[in-house]
Amino acid sequence: MDFERRDADFESDGTRCAAWLYEPAVENPPVIVMAHGFGGEREARLPAFAEAFAEAGYAVLLFDYRGFGDSDGDPPHIVSGPRHVADYLAAIDHARSLAVVDADRLALWGTSFSGGHVIEAAARDGDVDAIVSQVPFTDGLRNALHLVRTGGLEYVAGAVTAIARDLGRMVTFRDPHYVPIAAEPDEFGVLNTPDAKPGYLSLIPGGRVEEWDNECAARILATVGLYRPVTSASDVDCPAFVAEATEDSIIPSDSVDTLVDELNDVERVRYDLGHFGPYKPPAFERVVARQQAFFDRTLRN
């Protein structure tokens, strides 16, 4: 099916969020609101998902968080679960205001860190019709402990040092201290499992790897353990699709188990993949097809 992509920016707390609207050649299509995971930008493989859904007859609002990608926001690259959820809620309001979509059929799509955001946003909004949560981060405490167990004392030392530097810059009103989002196992980064850096870099559009900002403010390391969207899962009043990667080195499997137990209406599909596997061929095609089938069932019946 033919579709057009156009700019559809909106404001979140007075700051412009850059967004694309994928508009299929049908009247009053359902709309899917989507954004990236930890430190991600919309250009990093998400257009492939948006295009697949648009070709199936869904409108898609794909946006960048404040301070990331083409969005405004200063200082940039502040990763914050609550702040990103606020951006999702602003995007939902914007999507419902668009005359070319059916505002009564609205779904959320999130991946990794935003796999948790869509849980929180759906619970708070109360009128979302369906959510897809792919390789979901939903329990910051379990995730933090998992990364500490994986990285050992060196990871703890790197995190403590980075937090201290960033908080010191905050209280003296200076620019943040940044750390890599993804690093090699012998280097410090928020994610430094063996597959983290190659997987993260594989999502970046061709020709942009050298200029890509693989960084975020270190302050997230001090607060990520407090961000636990799983505690809102029982308040989600719509069907949910959870795509789990069984070889995930970043998301502990027991956190996915708890999420599924807490959701009221959930379809869980396990894929024999690592954390970054669902984004790329050959797995991408079967992952997105299953998600489309879920949207067909929940938004069109």
Image (spheres, rainbow, N blue to C red):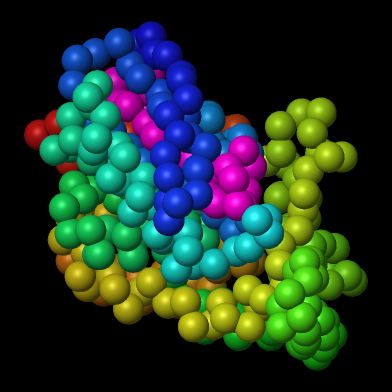
Nearer the observer, 180 or 170: 170
Q: Where residue 297 sits in the image (x, y, percent)?
A: 18, 37
Quarter of the figure with the C terminus: top left
Residue 242 falls left or right of residue 101: right
View extreme (left): residue? 301
Residue 280 in view of the camera = no
Residue 170 in view of the camera = yes
Q: Where residue 183 sits in the image (x, y, percent)?
A: 81, 62
Q: Where residue 153 sits in the image (x, y, percent)?
A: 80, 90
Residue 116 falls left or right of residue 32: right
- Compared with 91, 234 (above or below) is below
Q: Judge whether residue 281 is colored magenta.
A: no
Query: Which residue is located at x 52 percent, y 58 percent?
Result: 112
Nearer the observer, 170 or 299: 170
Q: Judge whether residue 62 is colored magenta.
A: yes
Query: Which residue is located at x 62 percent, y 48 percent?
Result: 68
Q: How many marks?
A: 0
- Compared with 83, 58 (above or below) is above
Nearer the observer, 32 or 285: 32
- Compared with 209, 157 (above or below) is below
- Compared with 238, 2 (above or below) is above
Quarter of the figure with the N terminus: top left
Query: Which residue is located at x 25 percent, y 64 percent?
Result: 124
Q: Where residue 104 sits in the image (x, y, percent)?
A: 14, 38
Query: Which residue is located at x 32 percent, y 78 percent?
Result: 231
The residue stretch that appears in magenta: 50-73
Residue 188 falls left or right of residue 88: right
Q: Examine the image and state in which quarter residue 188 appears.
A: bottom right
Q: Examine the image and state in which quarter residue 215 appears.
A: bottom right
